[in-house]
Amino acid sequence: QAQVVESGGGLVQPGGSVRLSCVASGFAMEFHHVGWFRQAPGKEREGVSCISSNGGRTNYADSVKGRFTISRDDAKNTVYLQMTDLKPEDTAVYYCAADPDPLLYKLCVPSSEFDWWGQGTQVTVSS
């Protein structure tokens, strides 16, 4: 069964770092554009960062520019989100989604049009 699974979340102190992983199974991630999204309690899901299938293009939400880095290792069928200088407002459940349609990564919005969505991983930034 094709799916994507996120991991790497947890409790981290303000100013700390964490790396999230999104691992695909049942399909080749290299042909898919991938996005990271997050949803904080009481808020709508929002786009964090997206990456093209060849990794050559990325985009970021203004709130995370300069702090988060998206990357991919297609040999491992994995997309990463390196998060640094974390702030309490980064607390959320983080989801990854994958799809072959390039429009979805360009828009980088949490669309139901993505073929695959993971179950999410919780990131809590607190002292």
Image: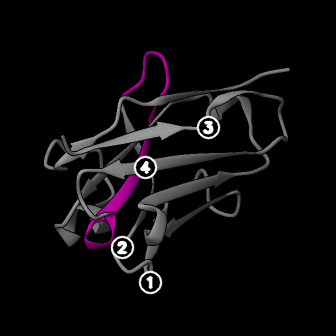
Left or right: 40, with 10 as reference point: left
- Please identify the quadrant where the C terminus is shown: top right
Q: Is residue 98 above or below residue 15?
A: below
Q: Amino acid at mark 1?
A: Gly
Q: Earlier in the sequence, mark 4 or mark 2?
A: 4
Left/right of residue 11 with respect to residue 55 in the rendered view: right
Distance from Cα at disc 3 to Cα at disc 2: 22 Å
The mark nearer the N terminus, 4 or 1, is 4
Structural distance between the alpha carbons of marks 4 and 2: 16 Å
For mark 1, what is the residue?
Answer: 56
1 and 122: which one is in front? 1
Residue in the image at 44% along x and 83% along y: 56
Q: Which mark is residue 8?
A: 3
Question: Mark 3: few, some, or many residues within 10 Å (few <14, many ≥20)?
Answer: some
Residue under the point 83% across and 33% down:
14
Task: Kindly report the distance in space between the C-alpha atoms of the residues bearing marks 4 and 1.
Answer: 19 Å
Front-most of residues 124 and 47:
124
Q: Residue at x 21, y 45 (%)?
A: 2
Kind of element beneath mark 4? strand
Image vertical order of residue 46 relative to residue 99, above or below: above
The residue where tag 2 is placed is: 52
Q: Nearer the viewer, residue 28 or 61?
A: 28
Marks 2/1 in contact by CB < 8 Å: the verdict is yes
Q: Amino acid at mark 3?
A: Gly
The region drawn magenta spans 29-44
Say which residue label 4 marks.
23
Give the Cα distance between marks 3 and 4: 11 Å
